[in-house]
Amino acid sequence: MRTDQDLLELDRQARIDALNVSRSCIVQAPAGSGKTELLIQRYLSLLPQVKNPEEILAITFTRKAALEMQLRVMTALKGARDGLTAKSEHEQLTLSLAQNALSQDEKENWNLIKSPGRMRIETVDAFGAGIARSAPISSGLGGAGSTLTDAELRAVYREAAAATLDYLTSDDGAATAVSEVLTHLDNNVALYLAYLARMLGSREQWLAITGTGFSNAADARNARAMLEATLTKVVSGELGLLRALLPAEYDVELQRLLKHAAENLMDAGKVEHPFVQFAELSQLPDAHADHRDKWQAMVGLLLTKAGTWRKIINKNDGFPAGDDDNKNSLKDLITAFQDREDLRDRLHRCRLLPEPSYTEDQWQVLLALFHVLPLAVGELRRLFGERGVSDHNEVAMSAGRALGSSDAPGEIALILDYQIRHLLVDEMQDTSLSQYELLRQLVSGWEPDDGRTLFCVGDPMQSIYRFRDAEVGEFLLARENGVGNVSLDSLLLRKNFRSGEHLVHWFNTVFAQVLPIQDDVSIGAISYAEAIPVEQHADEGEYVVHSLFDADADAEAEHTLGVVEKCLESSSSESVAILVRSRTQLTSLLPLLRQKCIEYQAIEIDRLTDLPEIIDVLALTRSLCHEGDRLAWLALLRGPWIGLDWHDLHALVCNDIERTVPELCDDPERRRALSADGLRRLNEFLETIAPFRQRSASQTLRDRIELAWCALGGPAILGDANELENIYRYLAVIEKIEHAGTLEDVRDLERRLDDERVSTLVTPDCRLQLMTMHKAKGLQFDHVILPALGRATRGGDREVLSWLNVPLSSGETEMIVSPVGARTEVESDALHQFIAATEKDKDRLELDRLLYVACTRAVRSLHLIGSVATVAAGESFRPPVSGSLLSRLWAAVERNYTMAFSEWSASLARSDDVNEVFVNPVLRRFRKSWQAPIPQVHEAFAAKIPIDVIDDEKAVEFYWVGTEARHAGTIVHRWLQRLADRKGDIQNRDADQEELLTHRWARELGVADDQFNAVWARTKKALDGMCHDPKGQWLLAGEGHTELALTGVIDGQPESVVIDRIRIDENGVHWIVDYKTSTHEGGNLQGFLHQESDRYRPQLSRYAAIYAKLSGKEVRTALYFPLLREFCEVEP
């Protein structure tokens, strides 16, 4: 057994080996082990080895990670330049490596500190997009511009799926195929569309099987033979894994007992019993699919139908009364296997192995699907081409096509093979199969000892992104077999720099039980790697199990609130995080936090559609789009701006479903039935809403909704800046999808709103954060609270085609496919059941890893909160529900619950019964005397700015220039907003696309064709200037906001502003930057910049005052001139 000292030495050597730049490595870096620092050290170590920094490519999986890595490399380089003193041993190493890199920088004249754009640190999506767009013909991506958001993609997927229904009218095989799939789904068109739309989102996985469909019967036969051969290989591989787990020393005894049972059963006349086939058995069967039936029968000798080890053995199994010696021999054999859970699981899994061939019914449905799915892909690509857009899958597949194969590499592959000397990959465990294939293509031309290296780092214990197609088994294969031709040295880090000593020891004890005993590539099982604490955290860290019984969501939320309060009270500066598996698990807690005035930051927790302010404005939107939307009109009348009570609402609309609500509002008899207050409220509402009920050719739906909302007093019901920001986000969604001043389908709006997740704005003093466990990955907090552990979440959606990627120990990954049976056939479809069971196993194993990720975020304390149900009037308790996180943790915490139960039972006996009380819903509405305030222009403000530009503050910038320059300025602002929204993704700019879009915008602004060249030249110069300026790149990349519309109070009067760019720097300072497309001819540039600063100082001061008041952040202001490449800070 290894001691902590042994592990420390192994960790030290692993970190040394990781910085040996002549070796290719794959590093497992568990939670808190300093993975990012090691990655940066490797990058700095490589810089002195290359002539150009572009020879090193670092790939990450999020923009945030890429920016953080670039920032930390720059910080190290600047620290080495400035002679910074290190505070720790690893900081000293980083600075030393940075000093060596600076020496190479000076020698080769790189000037990296001023030209950070030369460092190729990119996301895998951005890198793939760059490949695809650099070869638009061979990649097949064409002129596709931006990638769509998830919400937009779902709408396009559904549209492409719906387009396949048009093939029903064709006179070829497509009509038959679509009809067969519909028949298979009981002619449920909605189900058909939902299935196909979801399948399109994962098409990169199954297109390798379907291709473009089969052109003739011979192709279909060949495909069937190939798929069935794959099934045979997978079933044989599964049996091989089982055979390897069976201890060889028991083979003879197991064979003897099987044969003995078979003979007894034959003597008893039970010739149909599965054991009878062992009557002539001389040795255990080979691990091949041809012997699947024998292996499955053999499982019955050792396990019950429920998958537990057999305890009862009788004549029904071939061991009659009096056969005690053989019965005892079998019991001894099972006892020897008793502690082998891995063997028991594999034996039970053997029962699920399907016949390695398709039935005729299955194959016919597969043929139909193989015809329909490529049609759907074709329709999707048509829509992408028409709209000049794409999704990440299309970009990744296009990059793969551009790179070609190892036998026939594309031109871009040869260029990259020449350019890239060293490749670094972060978060290796989260890569999808298509991304692994991209890596293989990148290194396909590498040869041993050619000086090129591959460095991969990640932690398979933290692989939690299966919903993004991450395949952790590929990490294991890469560790064993390398990537392509590149062999990798496997390294494992052990130190945990994050958590206190007691927490690290608890992790070691608990997760050694929770995670599997050994790795299993076929189902993505990852064993636990023991960690060791560091001296700085000796005798620190605590974990608390909060054992609750029969606690509903509200009671559990109350308990969680108490834990939060204690954590916040324990220190005035330490951070606290509440991490949940599902956002819905916070529903009861959020109101309690608000009641207690506990400030919190919720990271993408709420959906827009769940928020009260959005529910109200959504009702307004639906009402104005369709006067026959009865539910929306009723919600509008009940809402806070009108507030009819139940009696008035009932009197207005009861017993009449033929007429619309607006018609009933005009009915004199109905109006007379209202109370005096109700009639007054209704009249005021109808008068206010009247101007907005009819569409206007000159007014967008967004403007109509916003104006109506303001006229009704919508801003007055908002509680804070977060709610105002939510309204603006809602209006932005409206603006994207409206058509001709209305909505074509209100369900599309609601689907998109469901995908809009909301994060709250907070003050700098906020210490409490709420987020999902997935969002917390990579973060750390002093105190971590995990509530609702006893609650399970719902399962995933079915697909019309089920498939399974099976990594084999040989290094290959095979795919097996099956049509999902009709609803009455699913349970009897062995192939589908095998795939579903395997996916379920993978999900269960990932759930264990999610728990590991959540727990290891803690620095000082960890609180586990979960409730279990009691039985027999509180005399005992049940284990947690299956599928809950608590059920995965149960082996480690059951003792805590047992100890807490007696105390809970005693307190229950002392408590009084509490009856539930129904509480009437509260009606929120304006007071009778309320009137919307009339905005006034402050005199001092009005005196400074001409009246004709008060409504368009941007106009002040261009009042002295010609029309072409003014229009160019407007277009440049639009382009800079798009670039910032893409986080400064300037490497994938498409000049042709930019010119086309600029031309469209120019025509919308009324620019004549003979003026366009001048507008485009000025626009292009501004964009190129900013994109090639390090300060411009800094402004466009990173965290912040663009075109941020705010309303605040200046000198007692309301004022609305739109801020071009908010850029949050590495120190948390929020820079308010106004873009100026002014030019300057001649000398004295600094004088011109000083003059412009004076000119815009009052405007920027107003921006700063409003933003600082709403955000509570430290604010600085600046002007940026793209045409001059000048950044000019403007002090108050």
Image (cartoon, rainbow, N blue to C red):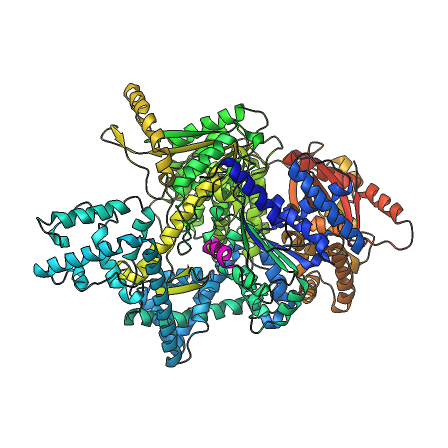
Q: Position of residue 932 (x, y in %)?
A: 59, 36
Left or right for 1091, reference 31: right
Magenta segment? 468-482
Q: Residue furthest right?
A: 1083
| Residue 108 can be seen in this image | yes
Is 473 part of what is drawn in magenta?
A: yes
Q: Position of residue 112 (x, y in %)?
A: 75, 51
Up/down of 866 relative to 331, above or below: above
The mark total stands at 0
Q: Position of residue 471 (x, y in %)?
A: 46, 55
> Can you say which quadrant of the picture contains the N terminus?
top left
- Please report the residue visible at 69 percent of the width from the left and 31 percent of the height from the top: 1052
Query: Residue 216's quadrant in the figure?
Result: bottom left
Q: Give the overall secondary structure of the magenta segment.
A: helix
Q: Nearer the viewer, residue 230 or 236?
A: 236
Q: Nearer the viewer, residue 895 or 754?
A: 895
Is 470 part of what is drawn in magenta?
A: yes
> Can you say which quadrant of the picture contains the C terminus?
top right
Up/down of 273 relative to 950, above or below: below
Q: Position of residue 404 (x, y in %)?
A: 57, 70
Q: Nearer the viewer, residue 777 or 1033?
A: 777
Left or right for 26, reference 662: right
| Residue 682 can be seen in this image | no
- Please report the residue visible at 35 percent of the width from the left and 57 percent of the height from the top: 241
